[in-house]
Image (spheres, rainbow, N blue to C red):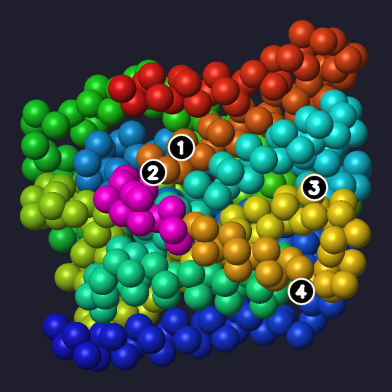
């Protein structure tokens, strides 16, 4: 393959799409516009934000990687995402949109007090921050596959590119990027899965060619207990994450919020199925990928398509990864600004709100880049499940009580439990890892 042609095509494709995605830079003029698009989004806009952030390196590169190493258990992330979006539309969208808040921690603080608002915001932000690391790892895998960059350069480029998307357009930019990502994502995964089935001689042939001792068509090797916990972490994590709920807060009304969640629930799970097909095909035919399973999807694209098409697909995957990272960073930034810094007008009165939001964004990205260096060899999905569980433990129980059990919210034992849940989750996660 002509690597030079591949690299040039990659750069041109990514550059063109990136320019389209950041075109709203000059239109962001206030903190409300940056964080909530002035609460004006239709259901498609809500869905673009959810899909654009939730479906990224984890649903693509991470799912193919997990399918290669563990088989069908790789479906947990995308199927859990679909279930959680459905529940969001059915039970939570109305209450969240009607309250008129900016962060989910602010919503919880109205019932459980300011201290719990700050407490839940810290854990929710930490969970999203950890998830950003997964996007860094996925981006690094692509950049190293295409250009052969080292770890340091790959991390720095990822930092700059994510920063460009967040700083330029805020949540409106995330929605536009999500729309572009959606169509590119389905194109890439559908074509790749079709090629895998064709090259592999059909699904039956692929399955029969898998190592018989690997148990890739069951949850045995992955573990039923870890699988159940990961699925639960996914469901409550999505229902507790600032950026996904921020899409609901940004909707024009309750109807648009609900329909945006339902659209997301319908289109996310099939992506996991396509990723599993690709991963199983690679496991059956390319044992050498085992040396670096995180490169499984880039490897497939590079070796199964002509240079120009492979470059377009790889650029699309990178855009998908960076868009998710951008949305998560936006969620962390919104939490820090709304729940903490905006309360200190005495310290930040001289800085324009939009400028302060952008400064926070840069700081969050720099800290994420430093954290990446502590886990460059980690499994991408491992970071994601851990982050989802952390977010869920800090937010979901309180959110559930407000929506379904509001009369019990003043109970002292309930409030103590809400404070203990994040600690219990961390201890449980450590115990299972050991």
Q: Which residue is mark 2?
A: 381
Task: State which quarter of the image contains the C terminus.
Answer: top left
Labelled pair 1, 3 in contact (Cβ < 8 Å): no
User: What residue appears at the point 57 percent right and 86 percent down from the top-left corner?
Assistant: 19
State how far apart marks 1 and 4 are (Cα).
Answer: 32 Å
Q: Which residue is mark 4?
A: 355
Residue 339: image tag: 3
Q: Is residue 380 magenta?
A: yes
**Residue 175 visible, this angle:** no
Q: Residues within 10 Å of mark 2 (few under 14, many from 20)?
A: many
Q: Which residue is mark 1?
A: 385
Q: Residues within 10 Å of mark 3 (few under 14, many from 20)?
A: many
Labelled pair 3, 4 in contact (Cβ < 8 Å): no
Residue 199: image tag: none
User: What residue appears at the point 70 percent right and 70 percent down from the top-left corner?
Assistant: 358
Labelled pair 2, 1 in contact (Cβ < 8 Å): yes
Q: Is residue 132 left or right of residue 165?
A: left
State how far apart marks 2 and 1 are (Cα).
Answer: 6 Å
Residue stretch rendered in magenta on the structure = 369-381
Closer-to-camera residue (283/359): 359
Labelled pair 2, 3 in contact (Cβ < 8 Å): no
Q: Is residue 283 magenta?
A: no
């Amino acid at each position: 393959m002509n690597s030079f042609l591949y690299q040039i095509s990659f750069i041109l494709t990514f550059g063109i799409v990136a320019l389209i995605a950041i075109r709203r830079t000059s239109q962001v003029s206030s903190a409300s516009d940056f964080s909530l698009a002035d609460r004006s989004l239709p259901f498609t806009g809500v869905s673009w934000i959810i899909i654009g952030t939730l479906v990224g390196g984890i649903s693509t590169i991470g799912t193919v990687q997990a399918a290669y190493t563990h088989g069908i258990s790789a479906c947990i992330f995308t199927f859990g995402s679909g279930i959680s979006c459905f529940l969001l539309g059915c039970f939570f969208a109305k209450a969240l949109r009607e309250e008129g808040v900016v962060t989910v921690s602010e919503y919880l603080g109205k019932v459980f007090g300011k201290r719990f608002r700050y407490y839940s915001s810290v854990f929710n932000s930490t969970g999203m921050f950890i998830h950003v690391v997964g996007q860094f790892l996925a981006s690094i895998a692509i950049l190293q596959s295409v250009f052969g960059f080292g770890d340091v350069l790959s991390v720095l480029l990822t930092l700059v590119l994510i920063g460009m998307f967040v700083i330029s357009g805020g949540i409106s930019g995330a929605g536009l990027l999500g729309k572009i990502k959606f169509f590119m994502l389905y194109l890439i995964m559908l074509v790749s899965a079709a090629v895998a089935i064709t090259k592999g001689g059909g699904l039956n042939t692929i399955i029969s060619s898998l190592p018989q001792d690997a148990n890739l068509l069951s949850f045995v090797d992955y573990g039923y207990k870890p699988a159940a916990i990961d699925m639960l972490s996914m469901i409550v994590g999505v229902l507790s994450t600032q950026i996904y709920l921020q899409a609901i807060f940004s909707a024009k009304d309750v109807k648009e919020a609900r329909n945006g969640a339902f659209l997301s629930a319908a289109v996310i799970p099939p992506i996991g199925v396509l990723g599993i097909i690709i991963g199983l095909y690679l496991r059956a035919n390319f044992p050498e990928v085992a040396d670096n399973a995180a490169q499984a999807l880039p490897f497939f694209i590079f070796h199964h398509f002509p240079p120009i098409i492979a470059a377009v697909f790889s650029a699309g995957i990178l855009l998908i990864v960076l868009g998710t990272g951008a949305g998560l960073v936006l969620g962390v930034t919104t939490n820090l600004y709304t729940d903490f810094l905006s309360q200190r007008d005495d310290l930040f009165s001289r800085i324009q709100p939009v400028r302060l939001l952008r400064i926070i964004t840069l700081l969050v990205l720099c800290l994420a880049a430093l954290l990446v260096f502590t886990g460059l060899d980690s499994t991408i999905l491992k970071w994601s499940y851990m982050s989802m569980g952390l977010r869920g433990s800090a937010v979901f129980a309180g959110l559930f009580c407000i929506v379904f059990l509001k009369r019990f919210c003043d109970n002292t034992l309930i409030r103590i439990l809400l404070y203990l849940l994040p600690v219990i989750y961390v201890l449980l996660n450590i115990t299972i890892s050991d």
